[in-house]
């Protein structure tokens, strides 16, 4: 079956891509397009070719699966398509409706004209996969709009809307009506080849002085190659080639750089994450169920988390009622809502009208009865089981019968809350990460009786909220925090052994973490860890009473100006504090822990392998469905460096046998999964739990 359709109207041939869901330009479609272009070029009655896409999208780009395997010897790629257009004698027009991304945008760039609908978006997102555009994008885009603007688009990797694309000169026109019909008009216009545009631009168009400066600055702005900037530096090199070389030589440089990257560990790690995200909605053993539509929401609690969750619903166009009895807290919450939307207006991310509408979609009420008509009610009260049980008991009598009751808890038992209701099938956990309106991760926690439809609804809601929803079983800490507690244990153990907290943090930041563990403690709050330890004595390690000591001193972290570190009022930069180092030494001496020399490599191994060891156990018990799910949690929720692929992928790349041997050397209790895979030579990415249902703790 052909992957495109074509019709001929007069002297114009319209080629419409038909390869759902995103009209991916894989080998098969590329081969067909090369043949179609050959046919048009050899037909004397055809003067022009218009490219369009079906189903409201031009093309999402190349098929990423093609990057992971050796192509067939006679395979044609998007490079061959654009090269054939370049050699052609006809006029080529791109009629862009919806997304033209990656190779799809490169196809459009090779055309003589680009006409977009008002909803068109163009972009080159390859950097997000650890790659660069490989079909001329790094050479054509700088020649079209200048090196600086092109670098900004390609280094961010985000789509550019039609209005901005037209302002930059990427789109020749924004169609007022049918984009293909308006493209037809340009197809009949006098020919103006992209090669001619290159000649017209020359050194002046590229920016004789500004462009080299932009390239030099870009090299300084992106991260070092070893800390996730490998592809970014190669991208800048490719754009530099567009300034220094004639077009064909620049294309050759781009192709060489692309081929280097596609074989790199960083690209493989990022491509792993790309596919891991797309696996999240595939839930083994879950009967197919149509998600319910969530039209209205309520949030119980107007604190920091409750306010952030309410803003998240408002941003998604879902009216939300915040139930908060404290007038003082309501005023603080209102102020936060106003400041958040005002900031978005100042940054040009939304209009004043949009900000007003979103602000007005958040209502504040004092009585729980205000939640009676909501499709979903998210409890966001104090992290205490007795308090939460009480809220669920009351909600069960107030909320409508089919409403979903969700808890924004980071550790507590969802089944214990569900037991307070007569509708446990409608109860689950929705663990938002702070700040809730910014962080993309949303852990969705299913209980023993949570229905398939409730799970399906929550997963669909996550997408509507622009969150990355990861399903977890109901165990202490779920996926993310359960792994983080062992990570914390090792950080504290290192400090007990004489490694200053600031050195542990510096080593982990050099590894690529967004924050070191001790800075994270201060951000989350030492008091939070103290409360967790009251319920679970072994949660973050109990060799010493360091958490108790800090709590007793009122050193809760950033909120009190002192925690592991000290803080200057109004600033978040941690300042090392000798007093805390002395407390660690005192506690270690009392516990009989002698100081020892610890190298940077050991620091990384102990912290990262702690994540891996617990992650393996969560796979064995079925709390986590896949190693890729755990990687996604750590990338989006905990600042793990994306270019490593996440902790589980990182362990696979090192080799599970090596990780297992090191953990044994540390004297830890090792997950049977690691022992099994070390012996068999298997990988965590391929491991599937034999648990028939999610375990519960």
Image (spheres, rainbow, N blue to C red):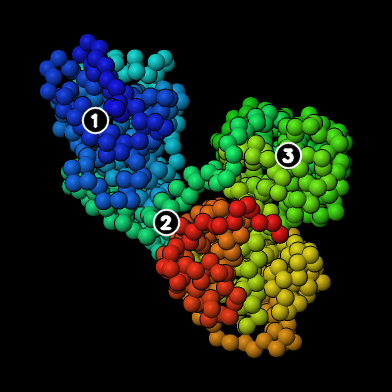
Disc 3 on helix, strand or loop? Answer: helix
Residue at 30 percent across and 51 percent down: it is 69
Instruction: Measuring from the top left, give residue 394's x and y in whole percent.
Output: 87, 41
Residue 155 vertical placement versus 654 (above, below): above
Measure the alpha-carbon separation of dots 2 and 1: 31 Å
- If you read the primary sequence from the N terminus, does the residue marked by circle 2 or circle 3 appear first? 2
Instruction: Measuring from the top left, give residue 458's x and y in whole percent.
Output: 64, 39
Measure the alpha-carbon separation of dots 3 and 1: 50 Å
Residue 423, quarter of the rendered image: top right
- If you read the primary sequence from the N terminus, does the residue marked by circle 2 or circle 1 appear first? 1
Is disc 2 in contact with disc 3, using a CB cutoff of under 8 Å?
no
Q: Nearer the viewer, residue 439 or 8?
A: 8
Of the 4 image quadrants, the one containing the C terminus is bottom right
Instruction: Measuring from the top left, give residue 673's x and y in whole percent.
Output: 53, 66
Q: Residues within 10 Å of mark 3 (few under 14, many from 20)?
A: many
Numbered badge on residue 33 = 1
Direction from residue 110 to residue 227 in the image, left or right: right
Residue ID for mark 2: 269
Numbered badge on residue 426 = 3
Residue 356, quarter of the rendered image: top right
- If you read the primary sequence from the N terminus, does the residue marked by circle 3 or circle 1 appear first? 1
Instruction: Measuring from the top left, give residue 4's x and y in whole percent.
Output: 30, 26
Disc 2 on helix, strand or loop? Answer: helix
Residue at 50 percent across and 46 percent down: it is 279
Direction from residue 112 to residue 447 in the image, left or right: right
């Amino acid at each position: 079956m052909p992957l495109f359709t074509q019709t001929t109207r007069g002297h114009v041939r319209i080629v419409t891509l038909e390869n759902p869901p995103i009209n991916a330009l894989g080998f098969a479609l590329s081969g067909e397009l090369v043949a179609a272009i050959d046919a048009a070029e050899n037909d004397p009655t055809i003067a022009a070719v218009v490219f369009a896409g079906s189903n409201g999208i031009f093309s999402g780009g190349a098929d990423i699966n093609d990057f992971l395997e050796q192509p067939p010897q006679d395979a044609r790629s998007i490079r061959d398509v654009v090269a054939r257009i370049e050699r052609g004698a006809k006029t080529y027009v791109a009629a862009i409706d919806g997304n033209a991304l990656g190779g799809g945008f490169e196809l459009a760039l090779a055309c003589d004209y680009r006409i977009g609908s008002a909803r068109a978006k163009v972009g080159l997102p390859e950097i997000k996969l650890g790659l660069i555009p490989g079909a001329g994008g790094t050479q054509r885009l700088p020649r079209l709009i200048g090196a600086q603007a092109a670098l900004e688009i390609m280094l961010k990797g985000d789509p550019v809307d039609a209005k901005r694309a037209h302002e930059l000169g990427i789109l020749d026109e924004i169609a007022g009506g049918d984009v293909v019909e308006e493209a037809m008009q340009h197809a009949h216009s006098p020919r103006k080849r992209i090669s001619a545009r290159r000649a017209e631009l020359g050194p002046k168009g590229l920016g004789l002085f500004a462009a080299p400066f932009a390239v030099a600055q870009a090299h300084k702005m992106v991260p070092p190659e070893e800390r996730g900037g490998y592809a970014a530096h190669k991208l800048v090199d490719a754009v530099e080639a567009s300034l220094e070389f004639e077009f064909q030589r620049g294309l050759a440089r781009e192709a060489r750089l692309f081929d280097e990257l596609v074989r790199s560990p960083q690209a493989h790690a990022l491509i792993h994450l790309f596919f891991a995200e797309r696996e999240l909605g595939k839930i083994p053993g879950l009967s197919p169920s149509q998600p319910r539509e969530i039209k209205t929401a309520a949030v119980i609690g107007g604190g920091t988390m409750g306010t952030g969750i309410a803003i998240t619903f408002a941003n998604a166009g879902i009216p939300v009622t915040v139930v908060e009895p404290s007038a003082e807290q309501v005023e603080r919450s209102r102020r936060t809502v106003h400041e958040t939307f005002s900031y978005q207006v100042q940054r040009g991310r939304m209009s004043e009208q949009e900000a007003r509408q979103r602000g007005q979609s958040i209502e504040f009420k004092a009585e729980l009865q205000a939640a009676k008509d909501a499709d979903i009610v998210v409890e966001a009260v104090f992290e205490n089981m007795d308090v939460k049980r009480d809220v669920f008991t009351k909600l069960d009598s107030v909320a409508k019968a089919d409403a979903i009751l969700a808890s924004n808890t980071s550790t507590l038992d969802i089944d214990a809350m569900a037991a307070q209701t007569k509708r446990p099938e409608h109860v689950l956990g929705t663990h938002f990460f702070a700040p809730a309106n910014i962080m993309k991760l949303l852990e969705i926690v299913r209980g023993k009786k949570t229905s398939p439809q409730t799970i399906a609804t929550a997963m669909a809601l996550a997408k509507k909220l622009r969150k990355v929803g990861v399903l977890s079983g109901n165990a202490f800490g779920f996926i993310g925090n359960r792994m983080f507690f062992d990570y914390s244990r090792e950080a504290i153990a290192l400090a007990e052994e004489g490694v200053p907290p600031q050195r542990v943090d510096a080593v982990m930041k050099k590894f690529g973490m967004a924050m070191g563990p001790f800075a994270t403690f201060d951000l989350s709050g030492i008091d939070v860890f103290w409360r967790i330890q009251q319920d679970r004595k072994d949660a973050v390690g109990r060799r010493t009473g360091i958490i108790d000591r800090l709590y007793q001193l009122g050193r809760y972290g950033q909120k009190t100006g002192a925690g592991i570190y000290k803080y200057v009022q109004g600033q978040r930069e941690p300042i090392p504090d000798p007093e805390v180092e002395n407390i660690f030494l005192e506690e270690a001496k009392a516990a009989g822990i002698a100081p020892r020399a610890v190298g940077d490599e050991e620091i990384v191994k102990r912290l990262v392998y702690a994540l891996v060891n617990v992650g393996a156990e969560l796979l064995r018990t079925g709390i986590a469905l896949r190693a890729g799910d755990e990687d996604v949690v750590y990338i989006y929720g905990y600042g793990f460096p994306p270019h490593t692929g996440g902790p589980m992928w990182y362990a696979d790349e090192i080799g599970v046998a090596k990780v297992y041997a090191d953990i044994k050397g540390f004297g830890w209790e090792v997950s049977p999964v690691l022992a099994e895979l070390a012996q068999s030579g298997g990988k965590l990415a391929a491991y599937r739990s034999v648990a028939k249902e999610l375990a519960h703790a």
